[in-house]
Amino acid sequence: MCIRCPIALHENAARYVTLRQDNFRRIDQVDIVKGNMGWIEVIVGPMFSGKSEELIRRLKRAEIARQRVQIFKPVIDQRYSHSEIVSHSGFELPSEIVTNAMEMFEKVQPRTEVVGIDEGQFLGDGLIDICMRMADAGKRVIVTGLDTDYLGRPFDPMPRLLAVAEEITKLLAICVQCGNPAVHTQRLVASEDLIVVGAAGMYEPRCRRCFEPHLAHERVEANKNAASGKTASSPRPANSSD
Ligand code: ADP
Ligand code: ZN
């Protein structure tokens, strides 16, 4: 985007080019944006797949182009910083903390052109409607989030956001067990709650072959057995018949 004419895309009926590079190929994507157009971009994938890194990259470029940017993250996610979105590799950008999508909407200023949202899966069902309203109002909305939970099931509300988004990027991490592309977030700790906020040590990325969706459940059971004096791997009685 030309830095000498930082006019917002929608004000200029602009023609813009997005160049995206991955390890294997280069995709040149050309879009025509007419009139007062906003849109929704969603970045999904397991933990450690680079969602926050990619969000920060896009937002920094928007700031370089002198667009008005606001960045939000859910209050629940304060793993690395209270006031910044931070990637596992240490990149960061200042952000505002919100408890839900409506609170975020109330903080978005009319002149804001780009809204970045990290960890969208923690912002509740209202996220879809709020993102639609912001895009309808001419804003570029970029949301990251987990598309599947610790059991590999679709993680609401992200799948519904994918359905209404103009652009979807699905990222993969590296499976820590075998080195193949990892699509899953493996929970390592003993909990069956849907939301257990944590990072390295509590979760790791795994491929579909190494993913063990029932591991967390097995660890919960093992803890219960240990507490009651049994162990999951206790030797069977010698007279066991089966
Ligand atoms: P996400 O937002 O998807 O959780 P981040 O953008 O915060 O991901 O972090 C991505 C970074 O995590 C990578 O650039 C890399 O430095 C680091 N990382 C650590 N373990 C892995 C892994 N197993 N696969 C890929 N990246 C990893
Ligand atoms: Zn694997």
Image: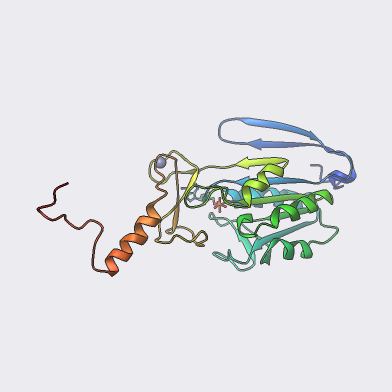
Number of marks in the rendered image: 0
Tell me the residue at 62%/67% (across/down). 75
Q: Going by the image, does 67 lie left or right of 219? A: right
Q: Quadrant of the N terminus?
A: top right
Instruction: State the scheme by which the image is colored.
Output: rainbow
Tell me the residue at 57%/55% (across/down). 87
Closest to the observer, 83 or 104: 104
Among the 4 quarters of the image, the one containing residue 9: top right
Asked whether residue 116 is in view, the answer is yes
Asked whether residue 64 is in view, the answer is no
Task: Locate residue 85, reporting x and y percent.
Answer: 63, 60
Residue sitting farthest toward the front: 241
Tell me the residue at 42%/59% (across/down). 201
Closest to the observer, 198 or 86: 198
Q: Going by the image, does 155 lie left or right of 66? A: left
Closest to the observer, 44 or 89: 44
Task: Locate residue 115, reporting x and y percent.
Answer: 74, 55
Task: Locate residue 121, reporting x and y percent.
Answer: 61, 55
Question: Would you place residue 18 above or below residue 70 in this image?
Answer: above
Tell me the residue at 16%/56% (across/down). 235
Closest to the observer, 219 or 198: 219
Q: Going by the image, does 237 lie left or right of 65? A: left
Q: Going by the image, does 12 lie left or right of 42? A: right
Task: Locate residue 157, reporting x and y percent.
Answer: 63, 52
